[in-house]
Image: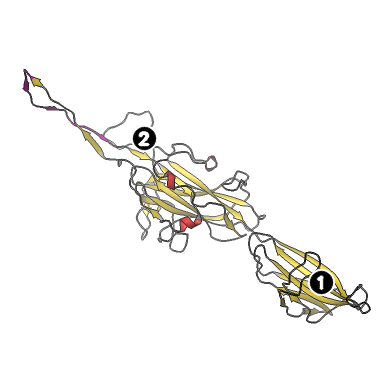
């Protein structure tokens, strides 16, 4: 690649947030189609007398069109998604490094399962769905309403770069950490039609790939011919060297909620020993501690603990306590939490202790403590 390579690499989300969505740069090289004309002259003398300068006829040739482009991901790591998440976004930049204003066809595809992903040494393990390509057209970094669904870029000037989003729906079933890799390919084209109301040099529809002037034919000085000059992208993209197109990849990574639950009990008193050295005899009070951990990478919603009190026990009224610290062995502490709603769901003479914790954030722990008496 040429002059823009030093700034077109992967950037952080913070840097992208402040970056222009249509990067305007100086044209790359002498514009295609320009006629370069030149003459030569000779001066001489005869017998010591200067003679008129003789000037050649003009030599004229037309500058040919060099097709060069670059597609780069703007994601610095895999985009975290939850199972079934709609409209998950990966971000790319398409740069016209040709010496002419041209169009680009845009295509988003999915990498083959089992092949190496873009980030983190993982392999592609799933596919996304509802894959679409949007072009940044509303002037604000980041995909949002107002950006344009498009199949091409229309009239991108030499040196300019456009932000393109691949927007997909995450897998509905996949293990935590599963990666799905998408590929954005831009192909040099002509004949695209700009989408009405979008900024010049951005979203378009239609268009046909530009063909290279056949290699091995003589240069036609009076015509603008076309030469592919693009580099080869990563092998997983399927892009080749000097093929009039370029591609880049980005990853989605499933960050699902993963819940674990533990239930612990201890005898806290009996009718004879009190709390000094209690045993599990009739009349003794048992304290249960239920612990839920979210070890996944995203929040779990509508998390409800439900525990039916065994028929050999009688629930102790108003003994529910929520989110006390767990000592790692058998105890939910009576500090740092709140009293819970009393046991509910009386059913055929049994009692079910339950609580809806709503959302449990990634890495968070919730506890529920209650007591019952042995009959």
- The reply to whether residue 247 is visible in this rendering is yes
Looking at the rendered image, the quarter that the C terminus falls into is bottom right
Percent coordinates x, y for residue 104 in the rendering: 41, 47
Q: Which residues are magenta?
A: 46-62
Q: Residue at x 67, y 70 (%)?
A: 302
Left or right of residue 349: residue 106: left
The residue identified by callout 1 is 288
| Residue 358 in the image: above or below residue 166 | below
| Residue 362 in the image: above or below residue 235 | below
Residue extending furthest toward the top = 47
Q: Label 2: few (<14), some or many (≥20) within 10 Å?
A: some
Percent coordinates x, y for residue 21 in the rendering: 41, 56
Q: Is residue 326 magenta?
A: no
Percent coordinates x, y for residue 336 in the rendering: 71, 73
Q: Label 1: few (<14), some or many (≥20) within 10 Å?
A: many
Q: Is residue 60 magenta?
A: yes
Looking at the rendered image, the quarter that the N terminus falls into is top left
The mark closer to the camera, 1 or 2, is 1
Front residue (pair 244, 23): 23
- The reply to whether residue 186 is visible in this rendering is no
């Amino acid at each position: 690649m040429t002059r823009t390579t030093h700034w077109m690499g992967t950037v952080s989300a913070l840097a992208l947030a402040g970056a222009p969505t249509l990067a305007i740069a100086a044209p790359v090289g002498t514009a295609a189609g320009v006629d370069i004309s030149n003459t030569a002259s000779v001066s001489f003398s005869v017998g010591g007398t200067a003679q008129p300068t003789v000037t050649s006829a003009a030599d004229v040739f037309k500058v040919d069109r060099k097709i060069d482009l670059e597609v780069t991901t703007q994601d610095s790591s895999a985009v975290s998604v939850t199972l079934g998440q709609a409209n998950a976004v990966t971000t790319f930049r398409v740069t016209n490094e040709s010496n002419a204003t041209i169009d680009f066809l845009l295509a988003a595809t999915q990498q083959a399962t089992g092949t190496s992903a873009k980030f983190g040494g993982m392999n592609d393990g799933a596919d996304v769905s509802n894959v679409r390509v949007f072009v940044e057209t509303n002037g604000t970094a980041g995909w949002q309403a107002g950006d344009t669904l498009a199949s091409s870029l229309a009239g991108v000037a030499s040196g300019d770069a456009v932000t393109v989003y691949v927007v997909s729906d995450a897998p509905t079933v996949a293990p935590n950490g599963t990666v799905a890799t998408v590929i954005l390919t831009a192909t040099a084209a002509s004949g695209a039609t700009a989408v009405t109301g979008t900024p010049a040099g951005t979203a378009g529809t239609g268009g046909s790939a530009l063909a290279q002037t056949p290699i091995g034919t003589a240069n036609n000085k009076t015509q603008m011919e076309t030469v592919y000059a693009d580099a080869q992208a990563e092998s997983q993209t399927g892009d080749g060297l000097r093929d009039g197109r370029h591609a880049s990849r980005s990853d989605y990574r499933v960050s699902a909620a993963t819940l674990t639950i533990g239930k612990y009990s201890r005898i806290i008193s009996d009718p004879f020993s009190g709390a000094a050295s209690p045993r599990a005899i009739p009349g003794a009070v048992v304290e249960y501690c239920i612990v839920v951990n979210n070890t996944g990478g995203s929040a779990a919603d509508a998390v409800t603990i439900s525990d039916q009190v065994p028929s050999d026990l009688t629930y102790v009224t108003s003994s529910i306590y929520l989110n006390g610290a767990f000592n790692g062995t058998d105890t939910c502490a009576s500090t740092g939490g709140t009293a819970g709603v009393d046991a509910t769901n009386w059913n055929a003479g049994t009692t079910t202790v339950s609580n809806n914790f709503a959302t449990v954030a990634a890495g968070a722990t919730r506890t529920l403590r209650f007591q019952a008496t042995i009959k």
